[in-house]
Amino acid sequence: MENVLRPLIVIGGSVLLTLALGWATDRLLRKADERHGETPLWGLLRRGRVPYQLVLCAALLRGSYDAAKLLEEHRVGIGRTLTLVLIGSTAWLIIRIAAAIVETSYSRYARAQSDPARVRRVRTQVELIMRVVAAVVGVVAAASMLLTFPAMRAAGASLLASAGILGIVAGVAAQSTLSNLFAGLQIAFGDMVRIGDTVVVDGEWGTVDEITLTFLTVRTWDERRITMPVSYFTSKPFENWSRGTPQMTGIVYWHLDHTAPVEAMRERLRDILRECPAWDGRDYGVAVTDATPNTLQVRALVTAKDASDIWTVRVTVREEMIRWLCAEHPYALPRVNTADAKLPPSRRPADGEPVDGEPHAGAPRTDGSGTDPRDHPSHDGASRAGGLRHTPEPPRTGHA
């Protein structure tokens, strides 16, 4: 009977004590969070209640197991299992506590800082720091778990002896991985690119969505995700539209007829921008930038506070200006010119001079025989109209 009650008392007591301590700790954190609403620390610490309870339960069971002398034939295996659970839950709890502290510091900095570029830079650094902390804690926890096995401790000396050769082999095999790792640290602390920056890479325009120690994800305007190694951003040029100030200047081109009312287009552009909420009011302008034999190239400059708004302003200006030209100035649209060419003033004929091979106004016209066709007896208005002379029939005076 004692062999049955003792395990139940030990296990049940450890579980009940764990639940009681976990409930009391969570209650205290909840009250602290309600009392100190200006900081999210206490609310973030509540996320660690599961690993906290695991640590308590594993520690209580590990301590009481040796004292109660339960299942002596499985003592080593059970004790090692509880030790592994204790190490893993402790590492999990450390990561949750570190994440709560780091996120609290970031939120305070974000509220106090008015520059969005600095906030994005700190956010990028915070996320990469948390990944490094999680990796270090995970490696230490895994090493501690391995050291609980006697075979691993015995092999430690041989592993240390061959560490130099293994390091050279690992360095050669993981050359690209290590380059991406150092490139990720360079991006995090070199302020090259940050989460939320608008970038153009390989002709694709998008926003940096995620940065890790090895890869970077760009979210395009059509909701696609482009994943590339972080070493790309340290070895190749790319456009960062959020670097410095997010304000941008956009360009809109039209190809119009030479008669396009450029001055009226300037006034119309001003009216369009006044009705466009995305325009920041800094600057605008219309200018003729090029001329071809058939069209004029008219350029409009507009401004906005960021890349998203500049796209909205450009498409709005392009659409509204074309609609206005079609309704008010259709002659300004490009067309194929089929009119006769105009001679320059120096080559225009004087009064009475022939034009384009026509004879002089007072000179007789001939058909090649030396006489004027108009003097021929058969020439009259009817012949000119129909091409043939009409001869009237003689009157009929007799019987048919």
Image: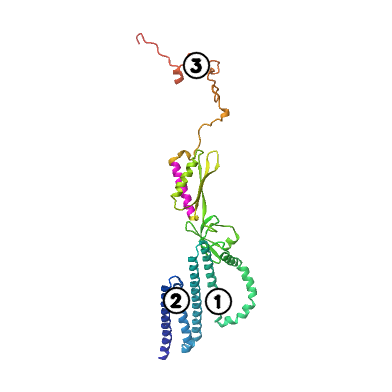
Quarter occupied by residue 152: bottom right
Q: Amino acid at mark 2?
A: Arg
Whole-angstrom CA distance, mark 3 to mark 2, is 117 Å
For residue 136, side relative to residue 7 (left or right): right
> What is the crowding at mark 2: few (fewer than 14 residues within 10 Å), some, or many (at least 20)?
some
For residue 400, side relative to residue 268 (left or right): left
**Seen from this angle, which residue lies furthest top?**
398
Whole-angstrom CA distance, mark 3 to mark 1, is 118 Å
Asked whether residue 315 is drawn in magenta, I would say: yes
Q: Which residues are magenta?
A: 309-326
Residue 207 tag number: none
Task: Tell me where residue 8 appears, x and y as whole percent.
Answer: 41, 86
Q: Are marks 3 and 1 in contact (CB under 8 Å)?
A: no
Q: Secondary structure at mark 3?
A: helix
Q: Secondary structure at mark 2?
A: helix
- Between residue 263 and residue 232, name the one nearer to us: 263
Q: Secondary structure at mark 1?
A: helix
Tell me if residue 250 comes above or below residue 197 in the rendering: above
Q: Amino acid at mark 1?
A: Val
Task: Tell me where residue 384 appears, x and y as whole percent.
Answer: 46, 19
**Seen from this angle, which residue lies furthest left?**
399
Residue of label 2:
49
> What is the crowding at mark 1: few (fewer than 14 residues within 10 Å), some, or many (at least 20)?
some
- Between residue 128 and residue 241, name the one nearer to us: 241
Task: Tell me where residue 209 appears, x and y as whole percent.
Answer: 50, 62
Whole-angstrom CA distance, mark 1 to mark 2, is 22 Å
Q: Are marks 1 and 2 in contact (CB under 8 Å)?
A: no
User: The C terminus is located in which quarter?
Assistant: top left
Quarter occupied by residue 144: bottom right
Residue of label 1:
140
Residue of label 3:
374
Decide which of tag 3 and tag 1 comes sooner along the chain.
1
